[in-house]
Amino acid sequence: MDGGLSRALSFVDFGEICRGCNVNCCKRFYAVLLPEEEERFRETAFTVSTPVGNVKAIGARDGKPCPYLDSTGRCSIYPSRSFDCMLWPIVLYYDFNTGEKVVYLDLECPAAAAGRIDEGFVERVVELLKSCEIDTEWLKKYTLAPWPNNLKEVARFG
Ligand code: SF4
């Protein structure tokens, strides 16, 4: 994985879209860490098992919200949150049938389900992901980490 992927995605800011959201993904879901993020989150990360190996993750667990969520419902580490936190509700997965990488919008996010994520913005993220070197073995594990299956495909590339 490109060590600069998190930095390259630092323009992603869903702050306005997330404001006032009742779902609050940080209370419901976990975020899979890139291998290079594991050391930084060593104290709060937990292991998620997949059929092709384990990944590390942060976020909600056992009904408890992410420890980085503050009392006002905001991420206390927002500028330096993990890659997966930055990107969601955009998700990048591996297609085990074709070997392609597939970009989805996760409709568990009410803003994504309501079509409130700007298409031009999603295209910009897709172009950036296309230009990144992504570790396929890690992507396979990320893809198989258990997740609500409510995804809408928006792009795919080799
Ligand atoms: S690190 Fe921040 S953005 Fe990521 S799940 Fe935790 S509170 Fe949410």
Image (spheres, helix red, strand yellow):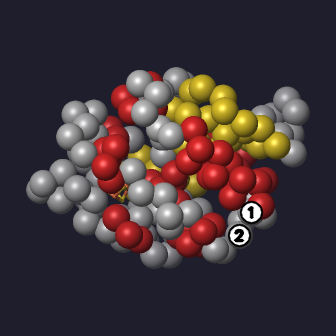
Q: Position of residue 75 (x, y in %)?
A: 28, 59
Q: Which mark is residue 88?
A: none
Quadrant of the rendered structure where residue 71 is? bottom left
Q: What residue occupies the far front of the structure in this picture?
A: 120
User: Which residue is rendered at x = 69% and y = 58% of the image?
Assistant: 128
Q: Circle 2 sits in a helix, a strand or a loop, which is it?
A: loop
Q: Taking 158 as reference, is 114 left or right?
A: left
Task: Give whichever of 6, 20 is nearer the camera.
Answer: 20
Which marked residue is nearer to the observer: mark 1 or mark 2?
Answer: 1
Q: CA distance from mark 1 to mark 2?
A: 6 Å
User: Which residue is rendered at x = 67% and y = 39% of the image?
Assistant: 103
User: Which residue is rendered at x = 20% and y = 40% of the image?
Assistant: 20
**For disc 2, does the CB lie below 8 Å from ligand 1?**
no
Say what amino acid the circle numbered 2 marks. Asp
Q: Quick one: label 1 or label 2, which is nearer the N terminus?
A: 2
Quadrant of the rendered structure where residue 77 is? bottom left
Circle 1 residue? 132
Circle 2 residue? 2
Q: Position of residue 134 (x, y in %)?
A: 75, 59
Q: Position of residue 63 (x, y in %)?
A: 25, 38
